Amino acid sequence: MSPILGIWASQNYSRITSSYESIATVTVGSGGSSTINFTSISSDYTHLQLRVIARSDQSSVNQELAVTFNGVTSGYGRHYLRGNGTSASADARGYTDSAYYLPIVTGNSATSNNFGVIVLDILDYKDTNKFKTIRSLAGYDDNGSGQIYLNSTYFGSTNAISSMSITPFGGFNFVQYTHFALYGIKGA
Amino acid sequence: MTATYEKIATTTLGSSSSTVTFSSISGSYTDLIVIITAKTSAAADVYVRCNSDSGTNYSYTGLSGSGSAASSFRVSNTSNGMLLDNLGYADNNNNQVIIVQFNNYSNTTTYKTSIARSNNAATGVDALVGLWRSTSAINELTFRLNSTHTYSSGSTFTIYGIKSE
């Protein structure tokens, strides 16, 4: 790996840190998958990060996802700020949703090979004194359409998060090459 | 569990430069993250091209806040690259900060998407998603400005690799 530019003063290579660790990865195979599950999530960390590329078989350009924690199907809410290429908008849902409706990846009408991207942070996921706050940066561009979201979600439970489940909302399937990677971030 | 977040390289400019390129990027990671703190000779937007592709294979959708209003915009079929800022642009007053992520950059089956956040405390904040319509693994990233302006000495570019199990 070599940085190239006109002039540079310094470059440093390959410093490994141990505070960010891979917990589990799921890559969807040729048969597709209706649900991605992460179970028995270790409590060794302070925060979790989920990094995603995903596409569903729904016959639209985009696909909303539904995320639940610990098998709980109540007490979710969210606020978001969205850009759709022509205007910005903001919206909120109350604390009575049955899942965290996570925007937004590509559906089967998007250009072939085009997958949406999500980076999702679950903060203080094992703290039993707090309700949980999750934030995400997510979106897709399809060369003529696209959306980008800044999202904050509330999960009204003081239980430590030990499992999470992600499905394409509406009963659809993730297609092949969809990739979910869960990481743990350690505190001091 | 494995240690999996690695700094690959840092470039700090010793003098002005119109572009910064990370080349021969290893394919051994799952995702890439680049953090930029940039100052430029004059107000300019930052783009990234992949693998020296100068074709019209890029597009992007953005969301910006100016301090008084939010807005969204899109550009398709451009050769400039994937845009990494808008109102949080680089200039010669406030250091701009960009964090841009390339998930699954090394696979050869999907198009590549960048997702970025940029800030300039004096001008605005942005979130942008960009598409490079290529299934090639990303092995080179070139950060460039949309004009004849240049990055100033002291601008810093750091690339990290994240490796999943």
Image: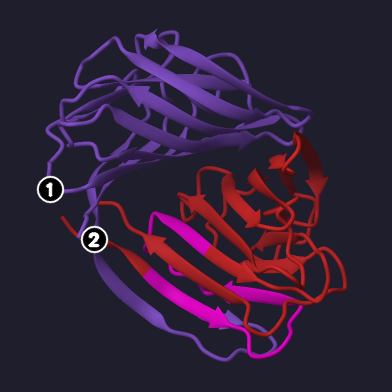
Chain colours: A purple, B red
Q: Residue lying at the far right in this picture: please name it.
A: B148
Label 2 marks which chain's residue? A
Is residue A178 in view from this perspective? Answer: no
Residue at 63% x, 29% y is A82
Crowd rating for badge 1 (residues with CA inside 10 Å; few <14, some 14–19, many 20+): few
Q: Is residue B31 magenta?
A: yes
On the image, the x and y values in percent for residue A41 come to 15, 37
Give the image quarter of residue A4: bottom right
- Give the vertical position of B129 relative to B14 (above or below): above
Q: Quadrant of residue A108?
A: top right
Q: Where does label 2 land, which residue?
A: A19
x, y percentage for residue B42? 83, 71
Q: Amino acid at mark 1?
A: Asp
Q: Say if labels 1 and 2 share a chain.
A: yes
Mark 1, chain letter?
A
Q: Nearer the viewer, residue B126 or B146?
A: B126
Q: Quadrant of residue A169?
A: top left
Asked whether residue A121 appears in the rendered view, the answer is: yes
Query: Which one is in front, A28 or B58?
Result: B58
Q: Amino acid at mark 2?
A: Ser
Q: Which residues are magenta?
A: B7-34
Query: Image height check: is A176 above or below B149?
Result: above
In percent of the image, x 44 and y 11: which residue is there? A94
Q: Which mark is residue A15?
A: none
Residue A186 place in picture, x, y as percent: 21, 55
Q: Is residue A170 left or right of residue A61?
A: left
Which residue, given by chain and number where applicable, does mark 1 sit on? Answer: A44
How many other residues sit within 10 Å of disc 2, few (<14), some (14-19) or many (≥20)?
some
* B148 w.r.t. A54: above or below: below
Q: Is residue B6 magenta?
A: no
